[in-house]
Image (spheres, rainbow, N blue to C red):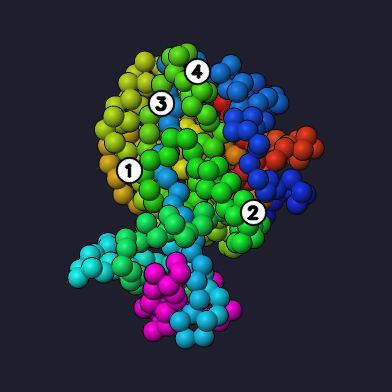
Amino acid sequence: MLTADFDYHLPEELIAQVPPEVRGTSRMMVLDRASDTLEHKHISDITAYLRSGDLLILNNTRVFPARILGQWEDTGGAAELLLLDCREAEQHCDGHFTSQWRCMCGSGRKARTGHTICCAENQLHADILNKDEEGHSLVRFRSDAPLMSLLDAHGLTPVPPYIRRNANDPEMARLDKERYQTVYAQKVGAVAAPTAGLHFTETLLDQLEQMGVKRAFVTLHVGPGTFKPVKAERVEEHKMDAEFYDIPEATAQAIRDTKAQGGRIIAVGSTSVRTLETVAALHDGQIVATHGSSTAFIYPPYQFKAIDAMLTNFHLPQSTLIMMISALAGRERVLAAYAEAVQERYRFFSYGDCMLIL
């Protein structure tokens, strides 16, 4: 299967640069696989498509302000860091905090071992220790205050590269901090939001609960690999970055109970799908309480073991995400739906509209 088989034309102006003015007002395309039909609705209409006994699976990861600006200590030149994952937990000794993270470094010059970036008004120092084969830097952070408190005060929300931002625009920084986060986010660790969840409000979740639609949570800390382009000509040759996941016992039991009672498992977002399908593949189709790292790559003709339906945003051409939903709904059907979404002027990608696949 060729990566080019998942291409489609997208006018640039349809890439959403900001969220809808009011959370919970996005448009929703409904793709029904059984009837092979498309409907144009809004996220508030999801109540008409779910029923008592269904179980929503939500990813409760929380995006942290992982992007921080600074200057090279030796030249004063501009630099920035995007924290990806912690490699050595923070330690506190003699009044100083230290930790090690794998980071992406942006600068007009190459990040070299031994160089230091000064951040957070010189309260945080980032020493470049080495670089890996992917070009990411291992960085030691040194400060007099905990790293997360400095990021909360000085860091920026790491919105995707197709959302264009001026780092010096405080209004956009405030907007992203509030809206590039689900209302149920709890577990800190993601550098990208599980964007299908951005459409839900507390009111809508309460409406679904009153209908008898239950909800349960998984955690998958979304990394920058979610935006990583598929460079391989053949789909099968692409390798996914590892992402940490966790399924608590309460969620595993809720899924078992739902299936036993004939209810549907409705995954909210590709990250929830990846989490459940990763565990189901390792446990003969069963969902158990566990945690680990997922490198699952779902593309046609994958046979789903855990989910029955999903809510998802509209994804980049030739991306692993459009390949995943093509495995669920069929490549030709998905590409036809995307063509109609373009024609109907839906908003695309992280801050865009959504699709319910039944």
The earlier-in-sequence mark between 1 and 4 is 4
What's under tag 1, amino acid-wise?
Asp
- The alpha-carbon separation of the residues under discs 1 and 3 comes to 16 Å
Residue 336 visible from this viewpoint: no
Residue at the image position 65 percent from the left and 21 percent from the top: 35
Q: Say the numbered circle drawn on residue 215.
A: 3
The earlier-in-sequence mark between 1 and 2 is 2
Whether label 4 touches label 3, CB < 8 Å: no
Residue of label 2: 163
In the displayed structure, would residue 83 be above or below residue 71?
above
In the displayed structure, would residue 82 be above or below residue 236?
below
What's under tag 4, amino acid-wise?
Gln
Local secondary structure at mark 4? helix
- The alpha-carbon separation of the residues under discs 4 and 2 comes to 32 Å
The earlier-in-sequence mark between 1 and 3 is 3
Residue 51 visible from this viewpoint: yes
What's under tag 2, amino acid-wise?
Ile
Residue of label 4: 207
Residue of label 1: 246
The earlier-in-sequence mark between 4 and 2 is 2
Whether label 1 touches label 2, CB < 8 Å: no
The earlier-in-sequence mark between 4 and 3 is 4
**Residue 183 % position (x, y):** 47, 35
What's under tag 3, amino acid-wise?
Arg
The earlier-in-sequence mark between 3 and 2 is 2
Residue at the image position 64 percent from the left and 53 percent from the top: 163
